[in-house]
Image (cartoon, helix red, strand yellow):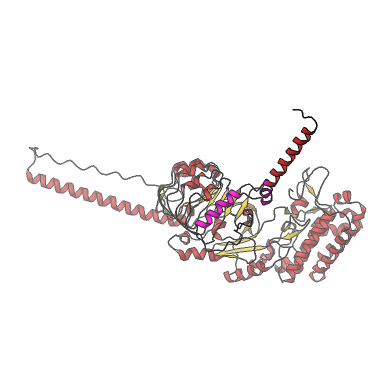
Amino acid sequence: MFFAGGDYYHFAGAKLTMLFILHLLLLPLLLDGEPLKDKDVLFAFLSRTPYTTKLDSWKNSTSVCQWRGVTCNADLTSVEELRLPAIGLFGSIPLTTVCLLSGLRVLSLRANLLSGSIPSEITTLSNLRYLYLQRNNLSGEIPAGISNMTRLVRLDLSKNRLTGKIPVELVELRELRGLFLENNNLSGEIFPGIDNFGEQLTGFNVSYNQLSGEVPERLGSMFTVASFAGNPELCGSPFSPCSPSSAVPTPSPNPSTEDSGGSGWDWILSKAMTIGIAVSVGFLILMIIIVLLILRSRKRRSNGTERKPNQTLTTTYSSNDRNKNSSKSSSLIVKKMVVFENGPYSFDMEDLLHASAEVLGKGALGTSYKVILEDGNVVVVKRINEVPVSEREFEQIVTILGNANHAGIVSLRAYYYAKNEKLLVYDYEPVGSLSGFLHGTRDSSRVFLDWTSRARIALSAAKGLYFLHSLGIVHGDVKASNILLKTAPANAAAWSDFGLCDLFKNAANVIGQGYRAPELVGTRKVTMESDAYGFGVVLLELLTGKAANRIVVSEVEEMNLPKWVQSIVAEEWTAEVFDDELVKYGGSKIEFEMLEVLHIAMACVKENPKNRANLDDVVRVLQEITKHNESSEEPSLRSTPMGNSSLATP
């Protein structure tokens, strides 16, 4: 369409005016940056559900996305997570409230006092992936419409008063990974169709209900007896085999009164004999049943003490401790998980047991697991091997470690002590270890640490070790794989597994090959001087690029890394010691700094412990080197020209 003269400008001006007015109308929404509809829903939920904990952030003047327990999606158009655990909610879950949050992916109302039934409307949340309603007073049946929640990954309804059967519709939840229904009043069979989940289930527990029948074969092989305990009528693996139903004996037919071959007295004798035989057979069957029950009970008790190896975090405390009729034992379990103050996490033993876990590694001290908590936080749980110290000694040692707080150490957040189980909970550092960066596969994706990065990592680690020593804590297992690189700041590092040597009598035996100070062969007692030796070896690894636990073979003998370096230096071929990649990409300007670090490293690995360098001297030298580089560009982890990698993705 064409406009002439003033008509065109009049039309354009009117259009701009309309756009300006529209912008003014939309401006409040843009500034708010919050889903107002979901905000109203949450206000309605809170107004209809009594609670005891004060929620100061839940007010109209604050964006719903900033409320406690609320998380919005990236573009702030809907509420994705609602987490209100242990805030004293009581009463029933009000209808047409949280069920209207169509974008909800996580709903956690655990550890409250909610009662009544689970509203069937909750099954309309088709985007929900995590539902946590455990530890309430919910009753009634599990809604059959749960099959509508096809994206559900974890369902936890444990420790309630739910009745009825386990819904068969659960088989339709193809993404389900964790199902926890323990400590309820559920009855009936564990339907065989649940085996269709296959290997996708990583967590499963139906203990302490009123279930009966045979345990599905695949479930019985995947999970330990603890997942099924407290259901006396269950049979099959992991319990004793199910016995076939006893056949009911067919009664003997009454003799015909028309039988001319027998007298009335013969008939009376025949009747008495028949009754006697029937009573004898009945008594025999009763005795067989009693014997079978006794054998079954003994086998069940025997199975109850066994553990099956698996890839999930499970504990070995007695299944009786989990009995829903014993509130005392339940509280004891919570008390044993000691969480240190001022930590960023809020969890207990039950949270760890229900969390997904994967094995990170196994070592002389124990096995480490990466555990994803319900709230999305990630921690490392180290399952300690059997230790010779008493519970009191264990708690004293671990309490000292838990109270240590420094950027150069991986914080210990909690611990758990039981007769057959000791757990330590640490922060999770996702980047990886120094050993992995130095000695990983040298392919196109390998991240190369330049000299500036290595010097800063060394300084960060030295400060962390010096801090431990200032508290009187001996690390006891100083090695490159126990130095974890942090995401921020750049080239920061933190020590893991520090101080655990005090839990073991022969602490020297856990030290990695190549890092063990010479004097430990005789004394077996780790010291700050032996820590200094191990750190000297780490510095040599940074300089040479060679791994300490790999023996270097010369023409005449096999030597460890310190002796190999000494032999090269003695021949005045010092430049031959340094990592070729450092020299190649750093040039001669860094060789002077590397020589300084070499001198301090060699002072750390001296044979006589009394002659070794102090950690404060090491820190001072490394500080001078890093200050010299402050005028240059911000150091970072640099990849070789063959690849393009970053710190976060080694």
Residue at image x 77%, y 29%?
A: 3
Most extreme residue toward the front, as rendered? 6
Q: Is residue 499 above or below residue 572?
A: below
Q: Picture coordinates of residue 536 (x, y %)?
A: 80, 62
Residue at image x 63%, y 69%?
A: 399
**Left or right, 434 with reference to 291:** right
Q: Picture coordinates of residue 61 (x, y %)?
A: 63, 57
Residue at image x 87%, y 61%?
A: 625
Q: Quarter holding the N terminus?
A: top right
Q: Picture coordinates of residue 583 (x, y %)?
A: 88, 51
For residue 388, what is the image quadrant?
Answer: bottom right
Give the extent of the magenta segment.
Answer: 25-53
- What is the number of callouts on the image? 0
Magenta region, main secondary structure: helix
Please tell me which residue lies in front, 598 or 145. Answer: 145
Please tell me which residue lies in front, 306 or 585. Answer: 585
Please tell me which residue lies in front, 297 or 109. Answer: 109
Q: Does the magenta segment cover residue 49?
A: yes
Q: Is residue 504 above or below residue 14?
A: below
Q: Is residue 529 visible?
A: yes
Q: Is residue 109 visible?
A: no
Q: Does the magenta segment cover residue 127?
A: no
Please tell me which residue lies in front, 581 or 604. Answer: 581
Q: Picture coordinates of residue 209 (x, y %)?
A: 42, 54
Residue at image x 51%, y 66%?
A: 332
